[in-house]
Image: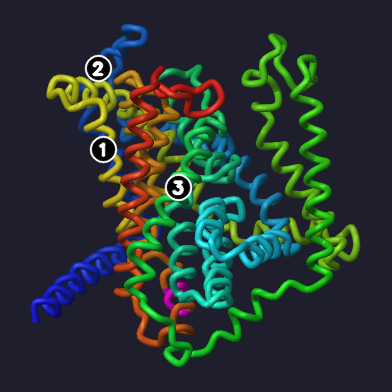
């Protein structure tokens, strides 16, 4: 009876979270409301004469009202330029063209199938987790592909397929932001971070590689944590798999097959990748390499600064190689057509960016970002609430907010104007503020009831267990989310204590 009461209590909590989340307006409308609220706050602060002293140059910074003659003129003169000058937009679209193209020709899906279905039993769980965590390379497509293939792979070796599905789902969601290479997420977040960091220091630049080292290590620490959770919590709870419990798995099994043509195309793509890597090794590794800086270093050279374009070119070229061999590209006109298709899902993002760009620039115009940062930093320092406790507070805050608002970039647009300047005032780099946000934003993705991919994951699981529902999914995702959060916090503390580089030329502290 006590167990039933606990289940009912948990169900009420989940129902409450789902109700609240469903009542949130569309992100576009949400940011319109935020713009209105910001305008009213700016008016109140301006009338009250709120100001701070910028500690970097000693100048007095006054709050400026958007609801004023000057504010109205500024908005009319900058409405279009705010949108046109929004730096993350071009980078995100360019990366989506390249990576989306590779996805459209079938390269990424086939590569995942080969990687998951071709490993020995002892390494299967680790492989699923490793590929899922790196799935952000393929954007959100990995959230669908990896769990389905992992379930088929686990069943083929006599393991419970739902254990594989859950490992893949946890990796692609709770570990979404980690990756061994720079991905679209890095590009998107860095652009926002740079825009908000320039509220404090207009000369500040934030490269897409600013979190690379930290996230590279994260892939391996999270993989290890996921293997532990799967072995100690998930597999024992699921018990022995009975195929009669499900609704049929033909769709998943057929999706795991790789044709001889796809195998040949994948082999050709692999050969091309080797030559591509060798080419840049020749351009970078020698002391006189043309992609080194004038001082001979790699970190300050064009290789690091041009890493995003290098990756874009790679995904396009390797996609062409695969597509020609696989027959998904039949003539040259197919290439731009598939690139255009890769952008079809970005129209909503472009519309959303228009109002987000206004919010970011309005925040900057009012000087509220600087004012909040300075006053918050002073208050926290006075209260002694700084350092690691402050970091943990913001991580947990992001975790909670993520339960009600699933858009990672959308939340960063809200948090960045406050968190980045405030952390800079406390002596931390913008890149480190971005790390704090990424940890909190990722870990609770897998347990968010309003997450759009939860119904898809449940539908996959029902093929193996007809009784599997949202409660089953979230209860089995909790150990993953908690483990990933704890591992990431420990890793973050180690980085702070030893002031390890977060990325090329980027430290924890300013």
Comparing labels 3 and 2, the label whose residue is closer to the camera: 3
First in sequence: mark 1 or mark 2?
2
Give the residue pinned by disc 1.
Answer: 392
Decide which of tag 1 and tag 3 comes sooner along the chain: 1
Residue 346, given in percent of the width and then of the height, sits at 59, 56
Label 2: few (<14), some (14–19) or many (≥20) C-alpha neighbours in 10 Å: some
Which contiguous range is marked in magenta? 455-459
Q: Which residue is mark 3?
A: 409
The image shows residue 296 at horizontal and vertical percentages of 71, 12
C-alpha distance separating marks 3 and 2? 29 Å
Distance, label 1 to label 2, CA atoms, is 27 Å
Q: Nearer the viewer, residue 286 or 372?
A: 286
Few, some or many residues within 10 Å of mark 1 (<14, 14–19, 20+): some
Local secondary structure at mark 2: strand
Using residue 304 as the reference point, say whether residue 203 is left or right of it.
left
Side of 48 relative to 147 (left or right): left
Left-right relation of 442 to 299:
left
| Residue located 41% across and 17% down the image | 510
Q: Secondary structure at mark 1?
A: helix
Which x, y percent locates residue 443? 37, 52
Mark 2 — residue? Answer: 52
Q: Is residue 69 visible?
A: no
Kindly report the distance in space between the C-alpha atoms of the residues bearing marks 1 and 3: 20 Å
């Amino acid at each position: 009876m006590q167990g039933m009461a606990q289940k009912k209590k948990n169900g009420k909590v989940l129902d409450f979270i789902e109700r609240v989340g469903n009542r949130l307006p569309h992100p576009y409308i949400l940011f319109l409301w935020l713009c209105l609220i910001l305008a009213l706050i700016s008016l109140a602060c301006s009338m009250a004469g709120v100001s701070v002293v910028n500690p970097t140059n000693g100048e007095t910074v006054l709050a400026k009202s958007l609801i004023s003659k000057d504010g109205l003129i500024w908005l009319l003169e900058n409405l279009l330029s705010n949108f046109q000058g929004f730096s993350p937009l071009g980078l995100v679209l360019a990366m989506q063209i390249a990576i989306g193209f590779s996805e459209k020709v079938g390269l990424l899906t086939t590569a995942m199938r080969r990687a998951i279905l071709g490993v020995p039993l002892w390494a299967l769980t680790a492989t699923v987790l490793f590929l899922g965590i790196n799935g952000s390379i393929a954007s959100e497509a990995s959230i669908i592909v990896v769990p389905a293939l992992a379930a088929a792979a686990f069943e083929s070796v006599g393991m419970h397929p739902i254990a594989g599905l859950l490992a893949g789902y946890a990796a692609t969601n709770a570990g979404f932001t980690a990756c061994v290479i720079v991905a679209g997420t890095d590009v998107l977040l860095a652009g926002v971070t740079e825009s908000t960091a320039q509220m404090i220091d207009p000369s500040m630049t934030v490269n897409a590689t600013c979190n690379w080292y930290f996230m590279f290590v994260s892939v391996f620490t999270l993989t290890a944590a996921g293997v532990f959770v799967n072995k100690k919590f998930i597999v024992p709870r699921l018990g022995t798999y009975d195929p009669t419990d499900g609704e049929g798995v033909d769709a998943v099994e057929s999706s795991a097959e790789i044709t001889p043509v796809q195998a040949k195309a994948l082999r050709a793509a692999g050969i091309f990748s080797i030559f591509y890597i060798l080419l840049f090794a020749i351009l970078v590794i020698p002391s006189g390499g043309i992609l080194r800086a004038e001082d001979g270093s790699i970190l300050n050279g064009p290789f690091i600064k041009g890493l995003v374009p290098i990756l874009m070119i790679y995904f396009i070229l390797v996609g062409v190689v695969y597509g020609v061999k696989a027959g998904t590209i039949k003539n040259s006109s197919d290439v731009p057509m598939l690139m255009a298709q890769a952008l079809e899902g970005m129209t909503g993002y472009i519309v959303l960016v228009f109002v987000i760009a206004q919010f970011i620039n309005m925040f900057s115009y009012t000087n509220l970002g600087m004012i909040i940062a300075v006053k918050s930093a002073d208050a926290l320092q006075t209260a002694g609430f700084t350092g690691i406790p402050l970091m943990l507070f913001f991580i947990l805050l992001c975790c909670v907010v993520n339960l009600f608002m699933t858009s990672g970039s959308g939340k960063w647009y809200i948090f960045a104007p406050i968190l980045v300047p405030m952390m800079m005032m406390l002596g931390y780099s913008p890149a480190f503020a971005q790390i704090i946000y990424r940890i909190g934003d990722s870990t609770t993705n897998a347990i968010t009831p309003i997450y759009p991919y939860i119904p898809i994951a449940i539908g996959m699981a029902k093929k193996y267990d007809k009784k599997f529902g949202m409660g089953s999914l979230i209860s089995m995702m909790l150990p993953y989310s908690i483990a990933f959060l704890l591992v990431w916090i420990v890793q973050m503390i180690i980085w702070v204590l030893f002031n390890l580089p977060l990325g090329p030329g980027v430290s924890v502290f300013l």
